[in-house]
Structure formats: structure tokens, C-alpha cells
Image (cartoon, helix red, strand yellow):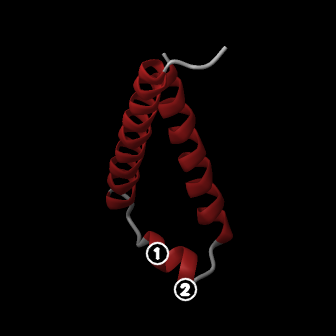
Amino acid sequence: MGIDINTFLKVFVNTAFYTLFGIVIFFVTFKVIAANLPFSLRKEIEEDHNNAVAIIIASVIIGIAIIIAAAVHG
């Protein structure tokens, strides 16, 4: 009934790899989006308290995360 250690290690390594891969892709994508905006994202959210920009960026983050999860899952 126990799990074979080789199977466990294989699944663990695959999970760690795809987790790191997803985080790197997410980070790069977010940096590209932030660099292409005609305004400072940090200034709009932190200093001007622009909730609309924060909601749009949160939606983009969730969308990117869903796409990455679907691509990693296959």
C-alpha cells in the first residue's frame, strides 16, 4: 500500500520544476506588461491610490496564472 520512493521523488522533482518554471514565466510576463505601460504602475497604485488600475492588474495577473496553469497541466 505504500508509495514507492522512486515514484515519489519523480513526482516531487516534476512538481518543483513546473512550479519554478511557472513562477519564472509569470515574473517575466508581468515585467514585460509593466514595462510597456505608458505610466508608472507603482505610482498609480501606491501614491495615487488608483483602485481601477489595481483591479485591472489583478485581473491580468489572474489571467496569466490561469494560462500558465493550463499550459503546465497539459
Res. 57 image quadrant: bottom right
Circle 1 Cα neighbour tier, 10 Å, few/some/many (<14 / 14–19 / ≥20): few
Residue pointed to by mark 2: 47
Q: Position of residue 41 (x, y in %)?
A: 46, 69
> Is disc 2 placed on a helix, strand or loop?
helix
Seen from the viewer's position, the closer of residues 31 and 52 is 31
Res. 51 image quadrant: bottom right
Residue pointed to by mark 1: 42
* Residue furthest bottom as drawn: 47
> Is disc 1 placed on a helix, strand or loop?
helix
Seen from the viewer's position, the closer of residues 49 and 14 is 14
Mark earlier in primary sequence (1, 2): 1
Q: Residue at x 54, y 49 (%)?
A: 61
Alpha carbon distance from label 1 to label 2: 8 Å
Q: How many marks?
A: 2
Q: Position of residue 11 (x, y in %)?
A: 46, 25
Q: Which amino acid type is shown beneath numbered disc 2? A: Glu
Does the CB distance between marks 1 and 2 fall below 8 Å? yes
- The answer to whether 54 appears left or right of 22 in the picture is right
Q: Position of residue 38 (x, y in %)?
A: 38, 64
Q: Which amino acid type is shown beneath numbered disc 1? A: Arg
Q: Residue at x 40, y 23 (%)?
A: 10
Q: Is residue 38 above or below residue 10?
A: below
Q: Is residue 6 above or below residue 27?
A: above
Q: Position of residue 14 (x, y in %)?
A: 40, 28
- The answer to whether 59 appears left or right of 25 in the picture is right
Q: Residue at x 39, y 59 (%)?
A: 34
